[in-house]
Image (cartoon, helix red, strand yellow):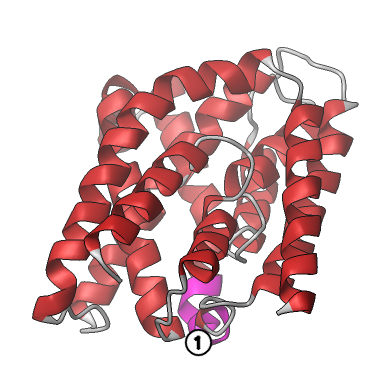
Amino acid sequence: MNIFEAIILGIIQGLTEFLPVSSSGHLELAKAILGDTSVPEESLTFTVVLHFATALSTLVIFRKEVAEIFKGLFQFKWNEEFQFSLKIVISMIPAVIVGLFFEDQLESLFGGKILFVGFMLLVTAVLLLLADRAKNTDKNVSFSNSLIIGVSQAIAMLPGISRSGATISTSVLLGIDRTKAAKFSFLMVVPLIFGKIAKDILGGDISFQSSEIIPMSAGFVAAFIAGLIACQWMIALVKRSKLSYFSIYCAVVGIIAIVYSLLN
């Protein structure tokens, strides 16, 4: 992978992380189109690096909300901040379980499984279409809701299933306000990404050859900058636009991916 390809992938990650269109699915498609021949472990490592960059941009944009989460978590008072922090923690449980016990199976799905990505994008399209028909309310995320949304997040670890699409759709189908659903969706993934990075570093799973450092750094910077720009206006776009628009987009890209895979 050269610097130019890394920057393109970083921009794709930054732009697609905050829309319900599956950033991981788009990264896999882009790698296939660019002719990336990374083995699954290397491909997943680069994907994690780019997700780390957009998680960092999320922290910058939501710095006040993140500060409230940490404040509430260590106050140990049954106030609104502590309850929200606890819901974030609960939402992480399913994904943590999947990451700990099914990591090898998950890694095998990365690295050129375009046909699989295509079908998962169609699943995302169906989820968004169903959510679009749900009525909007002003309901908050409950503790039971946070666990169910967490299950959706765990399923969305599959390439092609949009994490934000799955979690926001699940929230809306549960009757949660779309604005609150979007905020919860973007915040709940941040601890998981940093936890994944820490686990891989401590476990020695992430290692860089000297030839990989510059391209991955370029991809990281591109994803971070694109994330900073995209996070603000894309979040507003998710709140204003109908999810059916994204459903159509995912369906089209999914069909293209399936056809591309079958022809190649």
Q: Is residue 181 above or below residue 54?
A: above
Q: Is residue 111 above or below residue 257?
A: below
Callout 1 crowding tier (Cα within 10 Å): few <14, some 14–19, many ≥20: few
For residue 104: magenta?
yes
Q: Nearer the viewer, residue 116 or 97?
A: 116
At mark 1, the secondary structure is helix
Task: Residue 127: name its quadrant.
Answer: top right
Residue sitting at x 48%, y 36%: 186
Q: Which region shows up in magenta?
A: 98-106
The percent position of residue 57, horizontal first and vertical second, equals 29, 35
Q: Nearer the viewer, residue 34 or 107?
A: 34
Q: Which residue is farthest front?
A: 263
The percent position of residue 19, horizontal first and vertical second, equals 57, 35
Q: Is residue 1 left or right of residue 159?
A: left
Q: Is residue 91 left or right of residue 204?
A: right
- Quadrant the C terminus occupies: bottom right
Q: Does residue 175 show up?
A: yes
What residue sits right under mark 1 in the picture?
104
Q: What is the chief secondary structure element of the magenta stretch?
A: helix
Q: Is residue 134 above or below residue 128?
A: above
Residue sitting at x 34%, y 25%: 229
Total marks drawn? 1
For residue 46: magenta?
no
The percent position of residue 3, horizontal first and vertical second, equals 23, 60
- Quadrant the N terminus occupies: bottom left
Q: Does residue 68 show up?
A: no
The percent position of residue 36, horizontal first and vertical second, equals 43, 74
Q: Is residue 198 left or right of residue 29?
A: left
Q: Is residue 211 left or right of residue 166?
A: left
Q: Is residue 243 above or below residue 144?
A: above
